[in-house]
Image: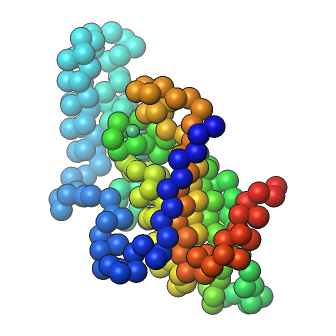
Amino acid sequence: MNNHTHQHDDHDHDDHHDHSEFTTQTPLRADAFELSDDAKIDIIAGHFKSIMETLGLDLSDDSLKGTPRRVAKMYVKESFWGLNPEAKPSVSHFKNKFKYQQILLEKDIQFYTNCEHHFVPFFGNAHVAYIPNGKVIGLSKLNRIVEYYSKRPQVQERMTMQIAQELKSILGTENVAVIINAKHLCVASRGIKDNSSHTTTAEYCGLFNEPENRLELHRLLSIV
Ligand SMILES: [Zn+2]
């Protein structure tokens, strides 16, 4: 198994903090949400029909004729609903009343997303960890945040950083780590056709830059 590891340490960004938010944002047009979902589905269905016809497919065939609208609905309602900031999961806090101050790790959060370079899936597991200060959140919210950032055209490095940044702002702490391991179908099923490689990305922030915390996180990741 080939592992390509990209690490983003907080130290890399310390000198130009004002740019880091900008660079981790998904590039969106200013008018991204002026059209309704239904209007977007109509337009995409028309374009997808043209793509299929250009490929030479006969859209009067029973099996094909519903495809343009099916794809358009899937794009807008399922694959890419996380483009809209209004769809961001609302997160309620609990007081950290047990004064828990160790690493909390949510491991193996399964996700499916689409690579923005080929529009084919990449999928895998996200491991999300934080060390609470005053606030804790419901465990399922960690899954919801990963899901939200996966439902848009993505780049694995950016998705890793977006999740970390969101957690930092929700939890009011820098002490967050996100590790993602994914299989990219654009690598497995086309191009180089490497079916065995995975890609690992990691974002360590705050106390997770300290060797003992990082070791402890990796130890927790390695036990079942
Ligand atoms: Zn790709």
Give the quarter of the figure containing the C terminus. bottom right
Towards the viewer: 135 or 4: 4
195 relative to 186 in the view: left or right? right
Residue ranking furthest to the right = 224
Left or right: 102, with 198 as reference point: right
Q: Residue at x 59, y 40 (%)?
A: 2
Would residue 90 be visible to someone looking at this image?
Answer: no
In the image, residue 52 above or below residue 149: above
Residue plotted at (63% across, 90% down): 134
Out of 71 and 151, give the one closest to the viewer: 151
The answer to whether 19 is drawn above or below residue 122 in the figure is below
Q: Residue at x 69, y 59 (%)?
A: 107
Tell me where residue 73 appears, x and y as whole percent.
Answer: 36, 38
Position in image of residue 118 (x %, y %) = 35, 36
Percent coordinates x, y for residue 100 in the rendering: 75, 85
Quadrant of the displayed image that contains ligand 1: top left
Viewer-closest of 178 and 53: 178
Residue depicted at x 48% and y 75%? 10
- Rendered-image quadrant of the N terminus: top right
Classify residue 115 by image quadrant.
top left
Residue 195 seen anywhere in this rendered image of the structure? yes
**In the picture shown, does residue 23 fall above or below 67?**
below
